[in-house]
Image (spheres, rainbow, N blue to C red):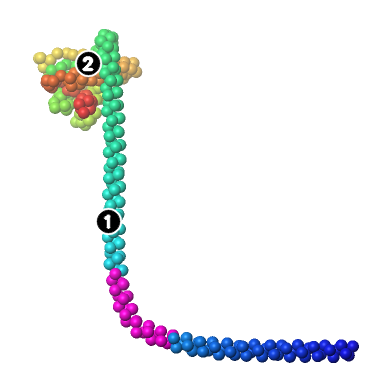
Amino acid sequence: MEVAHGEGAADLRRYMAARRAACDRRIAHGRERTAAAASAFRAAILSARSLAEGNVAHREKLNRLKDQLRGLEAGLAEAMSAQVKKGSECKLTTESISNATTTNEQLRSLVSDQRARRDEYANVISHQLEAVEALEANFDVVGKKSLDEAIMWYSKFLGFRVVAGEAVKFVFNKVDMQSPDNEYMFCIKVNNDEYSLIECVPLLKDLEELVNDLNRSNDLFRFVRIMRARFQAAATKGVHPAISLCTDTSSTTISSPPALSVDTTSESTTSQRHSRNRSKNQDVRAQRETRSQSTRSPPTTPSSTRRSPRFAAADAGNRR
């Protein structure tokens, strides 16, 4: 056992001697590398010093080149800005031309469609007018009978009549239940497509406002209904007509328009039906007159009677 322990100590010493020799070799190698690195570092310092001296020498030249570069950059920026502006203008012009071309094509298509639709509507209207002309003859016969009955009804129960002359006089009796024979009247004259109230017996309040409303709405039937209602209210307050005015030796009594409903339900129903028939008949006749005037070459003389603005608007639309 002691022999074995002595052999282990000898091996350890040999191992330690070998490791010491290896460390010495490494230390020597490290010293050589350090010396080589120090020599290279000194050479690098010398080289860096020479480069620094060269950089100092070229600094002024570099500053001059920087100044020139700044000037070139400013010129480049201006050139780029002008180029971008011109490119934007060119793009906008191209888009405008494209939009105009598209709009032109759409308008051409729309005009073509409108022309086709106009021709189609013209054919439909022509057929409808022919049918209306055929029905109008029968309607005139039946409508005249109904109109005569309505006129007789208005004259009998409302005591209403119209006297035509230079002005149109609307006369009412049977307004005052206590004095049914008292006649209430007003005269209207049409001048340059405008209504004006000539006389009113008895005199009522707010007549100017009523006439202005009549000229705005062109609803004569409504105006006559309002006037009769005002006469009834005046009769209730004890206001009675004094004299009969607006006389004319050349005037003749004509039938009243059948759209003057005032008090009763049956009166309103009858007058509304006749008013619709009369309005429809006038519209048909206005369209026929417009067609005949557009086909005849010589102009027609203006009528002395007042045309409704809606007929004038229809004529203007047909002429366009």
Q: Label 2 neighbourhood size at 10 Å, few (<14), some (14-19), many (20+)? A: some
* Residue 293 x %, y %: 17, 20
For the question of whether residue 53 can be seen, the reply is yes
Q: Give SS at disc 1.
A: helix
Q: Residue at x 27, y 67 (%)?
A: 75
In the picture provided, is 25 more to the left or to the right than 136?
right
Q: Quadrant of the C terminus?
A: top left
Per the image, the residue denoted by label 2 is 256
Indicate whether 177 appears above or below 314: above
Q: Tally the numbered discs.
A: 2
In the picture provided, is 248 more to the left or to the right than 262?
left
- Residue 8 falls in image quadrant: bottom right
The answer to whether residue 268 is magenta is: no
Q: Label 1 neighbourhood size at 10 Å, few (<14), some (14-19), many (20+)? A: few
In the picture provided, is 108 more to the left or to the right than 25?
left
Bounds of the magenta segment: 48-72
Q: Give SS at disc 2.
A: loop
Please name the amino acid that badge 2 sits on.
Answer: Ser
Q: Residue at x 11, y 17 (%)?
A: 248
The answer to whether residue 70 is magenta is: yes
Foreground pick, 82 / 239 = 82
Q: Most prominent secondary structure in the magenta stretch?
A: helix
- Residue 202 falls in image quadrant: top left
Per the image, the residue denoted by label 1 is 86
**Lower sequence index among marks 2 and 1:** 1
Indicate whether 58 appears above or below 185: below
